[in-house]
Image (cartoon, rainbow, N blue to C red):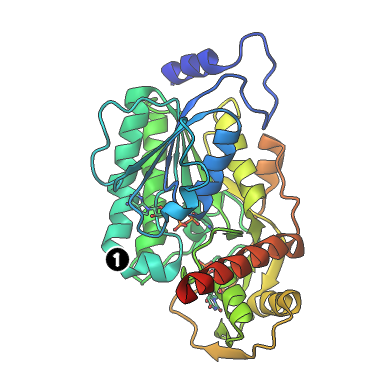
Amino acid sequence: STSIQARQAESEPRGGKQFPGSPRSDLKRVLVTGGAGFLGSHLCELLLGRGHRVTCVDNLQTGSTANLSRFGASNRFTFIERDICEALPASLEVDEIYNLACAASPPRYQADPVHTMMTCVVGTNNILEIAERCGARLVQASTSEVYGDPLQHPQTEAYWGNVNPTGPRACYDEGKRAAETLTFDYLRAGRVDARVVRIFNTYGPRMQPDDGRIVSNLICQALAGEALTLYGTGEQTRSFCYVSDLIAGIVALMEVAPNPAQPVNLGNPGEFTIRELADVVVRLTGSRSPIVHLPLPQDDPQRRRPDISLARSLLGWEPNVTLVEGLEPTIAWFANAQRNDNHERSG
Ligand code: NAD
Ligand code: UDP
């Protein structure tokens, strides 16, 4: 850990006080894996806007180059189409790494469960090795799914979770738990200045319309006048964080010193049933779509709400976009995407 402390001291701005969440003054070379995905593309955009050089590595499994088109022209942006389970260019030199590569939607990560597990374990180990070689600080994207179907509510970082290790969600839940294990092993051994963020359900523009997650499904169904699909009773809860709040939080976690040396929850503590979410979407879209109930998938968590006391005290961070404030631009984005899609098909 001495080497990490030395590196941290080197990377702080000279003579300047470090405020939680404030950008370090120097410009960085940043690697974002999964940068063509929903969260990754917003992160790339924020980092480029701050003047950093960004390399995005993505296999385009669930991401899309359309998400990168707005900054593809920047000479500070590089895209490498590659699976993180494979070797990355040996010449790659970076100061910071955000490891976001991994499908996040249940139907998507379950479509090839072995690949999901490999992404989390082999892929994360590859990225940790790059961080070690470069002396780069790393933020590993973990998830509220490490709490499984939680028996403690709301979930604090101290809770060890209630995960079925052999069920259909295990490739992701256990994969992410193993990725946390690897990350903390590298950290304890003094090999990498690594941090772990446990992300709770996050939504916003650039989610893939066919991704299968609740917010994108409901909005697309409502806009198309199709039935809104609620799995089970719709009484299960989730807490929904708007993307700009989440991205601000993970950047703050990258910048905070000293290393927190424990996972940090990021999410919006506002808790809603899926039925309530559907009602808000119907109201905001003015949709006449009916609601249909479909079977609840196996091991679907009953409730989920982050305790964000640690993020508040450590990072001075908290979300400030309400559900309605976040759904409005998200709905507008999907409506526009559908219009462009129809236009392309008819043109
Ligand atoms: P996403 O599916 O939109 O993005 C994931 C990106 O990673 C995609 O661009 C995909 O092509 C890429 N990818 C997947 N496997 C890869 C591999 N092996 N090699 C290279 N690229 C690969 O999902 P997202 O919502 O943007 O999630 C990003 C990260 O945040 C994931 O690690 C996810 O587990 C985590 N997370 C997200 C949420 C959320 O609500 N959005 C919640 C918890 C955790
Ligand atoms: N869900 C639903 N209808 C859908 C998609 C999802 O009722 O069309 C439910 C799902 O069963 C879960 C919740 O919404 O209870 C959140 O699902 P999502 O896949 O978005 O995220 P996760 O389960 O990983 O939190």
Instruction: Measuring from the top left, give residue 273's x and y in whole percent.
Output: 67, 75
Residue 12 relative to residue 183: left or right? right
Residue at the spot 68% in from the left edge and 29% down from the top edge: 20
Q: Quadrant of residue 231?
A: bottom right
Q: Secondary structure at mark 1?
A: loop
Taking the view exactly as shown, the residue that stands out farthest to the top is 15
Quarter of the figure with the N terminus: top left
30 versus 150 height, above or below? above
318 versus 14 height, above or below? below
Residue at the spot 45% in from the left edge and 46% down from the top edge: 35
Where is ligand 1, by quadrant? Answer: bottom left
Residue at the spot 75% in from the left edge and 78% down from the top edge: 283
Instruction: Measuring from the top left, give residue 224's x and y in whole percent.
Output: 59, 81
Mark 1 CB within 8 Å of ligand 1: no
Q: Quadrant of residue 317?
A: top right
Instruction: Measuring from the top left, give residue 196's x and y in whole percent.
Output: 50, 42
3 versus 154 height, above or below? above
Question: Which of these two is toward me, 138 or 301?
Answer: 138
Residue 34 seen by the camera:
yes
Residue 169 seen by the camera:
no
Residue type (three-letter) at the residue carrying disc 1 = Asp
Question: Which of these two is toward me, 2 or 277?
Answer: 277
Question: Which of these two is toward me, 272 or 207?
Answer: 207
Residue labelled with disc 1: 112
Residue 313 relative to residue 29: left or right? right
Question: Which of these two is toward me, 71 or 144?
Answer: 71
Instruction: Measuring from the top left, give residue 343's x and y in whole percent.
Output: 53, 71
Q: Residues within 10 Å of mark 1 (few under 14, many from 20)?
A: few
